[in-house]
Amino acid sequence: MTDVSVLFVCLGNICRSPMAEAVFRHIASSRDGKTVTFSKLDSAGTCAAHLHDPPDPRTMSTLKKHGITDFTHAARRVKTSDFTEFDYLIAMDQENYDSLMYSRSRVKGEKLAEVRMFGDFDADRLAGGGRGESEEVPDPYYGGRDGFDRVYDMVTRLSNGFIDYLEKKHAVDAAN
């Protein structure tokens, strides 16, 4: 059994990344992981505009609507130590991915987190060998409630794809 740690990252850490963290936790806890466990899951932002704020109320109501009622969070910014304390940093969009890659290039350490786009784990994309551009998780902050519902659907689909990817990857590692 391999323990994997994941940090989900968006801009302000009040909409997409906390929703991804909550949904991923919920899905991971309900699946019978045969090769992977998740002892450290968190989320953060690349900017400090909402430090210590709770998730956007629309994020929380969307989670509640889907039965995720035990999630608490205070926004934080990505720290240098995140690159050595997590196995994966998962960016919601290209801008945050680029920011993470720049920050990662300035971190010293033997084992640094793998930075990926969440959209890399779309099942159809993985089935096609991971070719093509990665789907971005859009920021619903300036839109209406329906944007949060769309983000919920996306992060649910991508969370399942990411867990499937990790299960397969670590099953192969265990067999070797």
Image (spheres, helix red, strand yellow):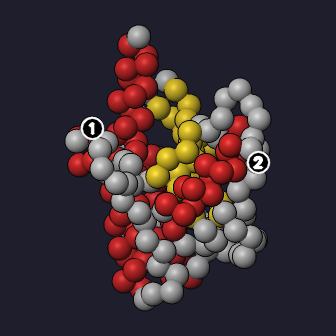
Residue at image position (40%, 42%) is 163
x, y percentage for residue 140? 47, 79
Image marks 2 and 1: residues in contact by CB distance under 8 Å = no
Q: Is residue 47 above or below residue 144?
A: above
Quadrant location of residue 133? bottom left
Q: Mark yes or no: residue 60 visible.
A: yes
Residue 8: x %, y % from top left: 56, 55
Q: Looking at this rendering, what residue extends furthest in the top direction? A: 176
Locate the C terminus and report the quarter of the image it occupies.
top left
Tally of marks: 2
Three-letter amino acid code at disc 2? Thr
Considering the numbered disc 1 on the image, is that residue within a helix, a strand or a loop? Answer: loop
Residue type at mark 1? Answer: Gly
Circle 2 residue: 80
In the image, what residue occupies the spot 40% across and 45% down?
162
Helix, strand or loop status at disc 2: loop
- Name the one closer to the observer, 158 or 79: 79
Task: Specify few, some or many for label 2: CA neighbours under 10 Å numbering under 14, 14-19, or 20 or more.
Answer: few
Which residue shows up at 37% across the image and 37% down it? 165
In the image, residue 11 above or below residue 81: below
Mark 1, residue position: 129
Mark sitting earlier along the chain (2/1): 2
Q: Where is residue 75 in the image (x, y as percent from the top left)?
A: 69, 68
Q: Residue 121 carries which label?
A: none
User: In this view of the protein, can residue 41 be seen by the observer?
Assistant: no
Mark 2 and mark 1: Cα distance apart in space: 31 Å
Judge left or right: residue 29 versus residue 85. Answer: left
- Tell me what residue is drawn at x 43 percent, y 89 percent: 144
The crowd level at tag 1 (other Cα within 10 Å; few <14, some 14-19, many 20+) is few
Q: Front-most of 16 and 99?
A: 99
Q: Please say if 2 is above or below 153.
A: above
